[in-house]
């Protein structure tokens, strides 16, 4: 081979390498962007972790089952740091119970043992739905046992959302109910018959 031929081969090889480099650079750009997004996300995740003092942001991604719905922890209570190594979570149920009572309402736990339902703290409810027209007999009886053992008021509900569910539960009373105050009085007195359609 002549020197001129070798020179041409070398020149072609350099051009090819530069073309490949440019081609590879273009292909790598998309991966570089994805990697940068991943690194930014990782930095945010690490940013929620603090050494030394307790930080409530470590709970930002935590969800709890709240009445069958995964709910961010911050939406069901107050989160605070009373001391350097303690994170305190105060659920709002107690506040809601106090608010309801201040307005003259009663707080009842509906169908407490149905799948996906979170039972309330019994200290923050007045009564329990011991019969529900859409809940099976075994779970309704479990609710009744809980109500009797905890000394709660009891009621029955049809839980109707369609016409087919009408009158599958509820209460029958001889007392006239014209308004919410009348209903509250009847529920407190427990002077009614419960509809159960087993």
Image (tube, rainbow, N blue to C red):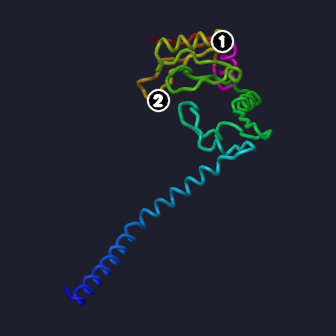
Q: Give residue 145's position: percent from left, percent from top.
A: 59, 9
Q: Give residue 38's position: percent from left, percent from top.
A: 51, 56
The front one of 74 and 11 is: 11
Q: Give residue 30's position: percent from left, percent from top.
A: 42, 64
- Return the residue found at the far right: 83
Gap between marks 1 and 2 measured at Cα? 25 Å
The residue to which callout 2 is attached is 161
Q: Please indicate whether residue 73 sits to the left or right of residue 35 in the image.
A: right
User: Magenta region: which residues?
Assistant: 177-190
Q: Quadrant of the N terminus?
A: bottom left
Q: Secondary structure at mark 1?
A: loop
The front one of 93 and 168 is: 93
The residue to which callout 1 is attached is 190
- Residue 188: image quadrant is top right
Rate crowding at label 2 as few (under 14), some (14 to 19) or many (20 or more) other CA atoms within 10 Å: few
The front one of 102 and 193 is: 102
């Amino acid at each position: 081979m002549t020197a001129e031929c070798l020179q041409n081969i070398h020149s072609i090889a350099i051009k090819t390498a530069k073309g490949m480099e440019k081609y590879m650079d273009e292909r790598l750009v998309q991966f570089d962007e994805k990697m940068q997004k991943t690194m930014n996300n990782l930095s945010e995740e690490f940013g929620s972790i603090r050494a030394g003092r307790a930080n409530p942001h470590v709970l930002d991604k935590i969800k709890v089952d709240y009445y069958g719905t995964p709910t961010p922890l911050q939406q069901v209570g107050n989160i605070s740091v009373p001391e350097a190594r303690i994170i305190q979570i105060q659920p709002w149920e107690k506040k809601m119970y106090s608010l309801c009572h201040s307005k003259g309402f009663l707080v009842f736990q509906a169908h407490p043992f149905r799948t996906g339902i979170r039972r309330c703290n019994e200290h923050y409810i007045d009564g329990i739905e011991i019969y529900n027209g859409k809940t099976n007999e075994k779970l309704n009886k479990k609710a009744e046992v809980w109500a009797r053992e905890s000394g709660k008021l009891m009621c029955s509900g049809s839980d109707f959302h369609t016409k087919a569910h009408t009158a599958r539960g509820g209460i029958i009373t001889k007392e006239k109910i014209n308004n919410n105050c009348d209903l509250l009085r009847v529920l407190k007195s427990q002077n009614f018959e419960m509809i159960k359609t087993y």
